[in-house]
Amino acid sequence: MAEDILLYWGSGSPPCWRVMIALEEKNLHGYKSKLLSFDKKEHKGPEVLALNPRGQLPTLKHGDIVVNESIAACMYLELDKGSYLAGKSFSMADAVCFPYVAFLVRFGLNTERYPRLVEYYELVKERPSVKASWPPHWLENPQNQDTIKDL
Ligand SMILES: N[C@@H](CCC(=O)N[C@@H](CS)C(=O)NCC(=O)O)C(=O)O
C-alpha cells in the first residue's frame, strides 16, 4: 500500500504533520511525498489544484483516491472494516465525532466518493446508543437531502 500513496505537504503545517504521523504510525514508511513551498505558492500550482481545488495541503493520493481533509486522511488510514475511530472498540471519540458524520450523510454526502466514511457510518448507526438518540425529525422524514452532494 505504501508505494501507492503520494502525500503533498508543507513544512510546519499541523494538518500535514498529523497525516505524516499517522502514516508513520501505520508503518507506511515507503510512501511517496512531495514537499511544497507555501512561500513560493506551490500549493496553488496546477498539480495540487487538479487534486484539491482549494489549493491547500495536505493532499493525500492513494491510487485513484484523493483525500484532502487531514482528519479524513487520518481516518482513511485507520478505517479497516469494523473499525471505530480509536480501534476495534467504540469509544468516546465515536460519540464525539459520529453526529457530524451522520450530519454529512443526512445532507447528501457523496457516498461513492467517501466509501470508508460510509462504512464507518453504517457501522456506528446500528449501535443501540445511536439508535436510541437518533434525531426524531430525521425519523419522521428519513429522506436525506442533497445539499452537499457535489462536495
Ligand atoms: N481543513 C484542512 C486545512 C488545511 C490547511 O488549512 N492547510 C493550510 C496549511 S496549514 C494551507 O494549505 N493553507 C494555504 C491556503 O489555504 O491557501 C485540513 O485539515 O486538511
Image (cartoon, helix red, strand yellow):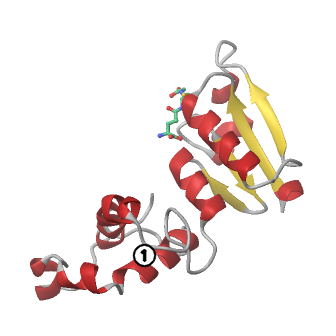
Image side of residue 14 versus residue 144, left or right: right
Residue ranking furthest to the top? 39
- What residue is at 50 percent from the left and 70 percent from the top? 84
Describe the element under mark 1 as helix, strand or loop.
helix
Rendering coords of residue 50 (x, y %): 67, 45
Residue 115 visible in image: yes
- What residue is at 89 percent from the left and 55 percent from the top? 3
Looking at the image, is 142 positioned above or below residue 151? below
Residue 45 visible in image: no
Image side of residue 96 versus residue 7, left or right: left
Rendering coords of residue 7 (x, y %): 74, 43
Number of numbered discs overlaid on the protein picture: 1
Rendering coords of residue 64 (x, y %): 74, 63
Label 1: how many Cα within 10 Å (few below 14, some 14–19, many 20+): some
Query: Which quadrant is home to the C terminus?
Result: bottom left
Quarter of the image holding residue 27?
bottom right
Looking at the image, is 141 positioned above or below residue 22? below
Q: Amino acid at mark 1?
A: Tyr
Rendering coords of residue 4 (x, y %): 85, 58
The one nearer the camera, 74 or 91, is: 91
Q: Is mark 1 within 8 Å of ligand 1?
A: no
The one nearer the camera, 108 or 139, is: 139
Query: Which quadrant is home to the N terminus?
Result: bottom right
Can you identify the residue that label 1 sits on? Answer: 121
- What residue is at 64 percent from the left and 44 percent from the top? 19
- What residue is at 46 percent from the left and 70 percent from the top? 110
